[in-house]
Image (cartoon, coloured by chain):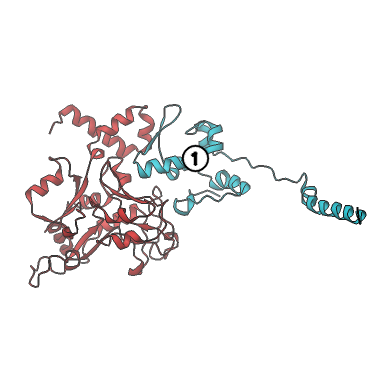
Amino acid sequence: MGVDRREFLKIAGYAALFGLGGKAAIDILSPGELEAAMEGIPLTKGKRWSMVIDMRKCLKKQAAGKDGCKECIIACHREHNVPDWGNPKHAIKWIWQDKYEHVFPDHPNQFIDEGVRHKPFILLCNHCVNPPCVRVCPTKATFKRASDGIVSMDMHRCIGCRFCMAACPYGSRSFNWGNPRKAPKELNPDYPTNRAYPERSKGVVEKCNFCVELVSKGELPACVQACDKIKVHALNFGDLDTPESNVRKLLREHYTIRRKPALGTEPNLFYII
Amino acid sequence: MYDGGKIIVGLIIGIGLFLFPFFYNAGTAAKAPAPELTAKAKEAKVCVAEKPYITKSHFVLLDEWRNSSVRDGERYYKAFNGKIYYKSLQVTCVECHSNKTKFCDQCHNYMSVVPYCWDCHIVPEEKK
């Protein structure tokens, strides 16, 4: 890696400024320096963001606790003001869990290894290279960012037609049947949990946005941060376009599978089993 | 003219009825409310653009912000004075203008415009 000591200290300094100072840091830096600072953070320069999920670590952690581990899900829902409706039919899914058999239906095996049989896998939007949801959206409310490959939603434009929900083969999209603000209070006592992030209105579709708002500031997605915080490191976020990135290293060293690869959507989520 | 008198009287009554609301309400027009600045906004002195532009076209700016930040990922705005701001209604604007009822709503109600910003964006907490 072509980072010398001086460069590294610079990056670390700016990262600390952003992490601690937030807006205060913006005020300190005079114009021009901010752009320079942004460029200094390697994380903002990804061309094809992806995630490698090490299910061995995740399942080990889940088996250790009595109720499993839901840290990533909790962190994501707190970050994005995702309410709990108490009704699975109205559930808003950004990151969720499902059984191995449901996650990988194209790997059927009657006598599968006990290590994965019926085990809860972590699911989120695959941020596909060829996203079918984007192709069907009549208002271009959902789009693939050319700069870094994140499949994002523009809630201002969504008309709630739910074509994208029908198109997505991974069930990564959810419809707001009610106004999130009116979600049951007893299930969401401290809602809204993040006053810096908007809610949604009734009648729009939403999904995982790979934490664009955090990635743009040089931070890792909320789920990854949560997983790192409890020292499990099962979720690995990085750039697929950089050969020496963490995700590419993991992909080189492990056998990974993707969900429904035969559909040609080219998911950017990889699972180490 | 046949029945000239009747027609003219009818016309006068008709025009009178038509103009009645104007005379009735003359002089009672509600005064345009002045948006109230918070102490923090007063202290800052400048907004993200010059005041006449903000007063007249803040919604144009907000619309540009939302498109460029959501769709193009350009999340920072360089103001006329060279200062850099994070493009966010809910974080940046509201940091100074935390008095939504006295700052936003007064004029919007007066002008009878109903922006749907706050359907999703969280309203700042106001002290009563």
- Residue at 31%, 46% (x, y): give it: A212
Chain where mark 1 sits: B
Lateral position of residue B121 relative to residue B26, left or right: left
Check the rendered structure and report the hue given to chain A.
red
Check the rendered structure and report the hue given to chain B.
cyan
Residue A122 horizontal/vertical position (percent): 21, 60
The answer to which quarter of the image holds residue A200 is bottom left
Where disc 1 sits, the SS reads helix
- Using the image as rendered, state which of residue B127 and residue A126 is in the foreground: A126
Q: Relative to A247, does residue A93 appear above or below in the rendering?
A: below
Residue A207 visible at all: no
Q: Relative to A22, does residue A237 appear above or below in the rendering?
A: below
Lateral position of residue B36 relative to residue B118, left or right: right
Residue A227 visible at all: yes
Lateral position of residue A82 relative to residue A148, left or right: right
Quadrant for the C terminus of chain A, please: bottom left
Residue A263 horizontal/vertical position (percent): 19, 59
Residue beneath label 1, please? Answer: B60
Residue B115 horizontal/vertical position (percent): 52, 49
Residue A171 horizontal/vertical position (percent): 27, 62
Q: Which residue sits furthest front?
A: B1
Lateral position of residue A183 relative to residue B103, left or right: left
Quadrant for the N terminus of chain A, please: top left
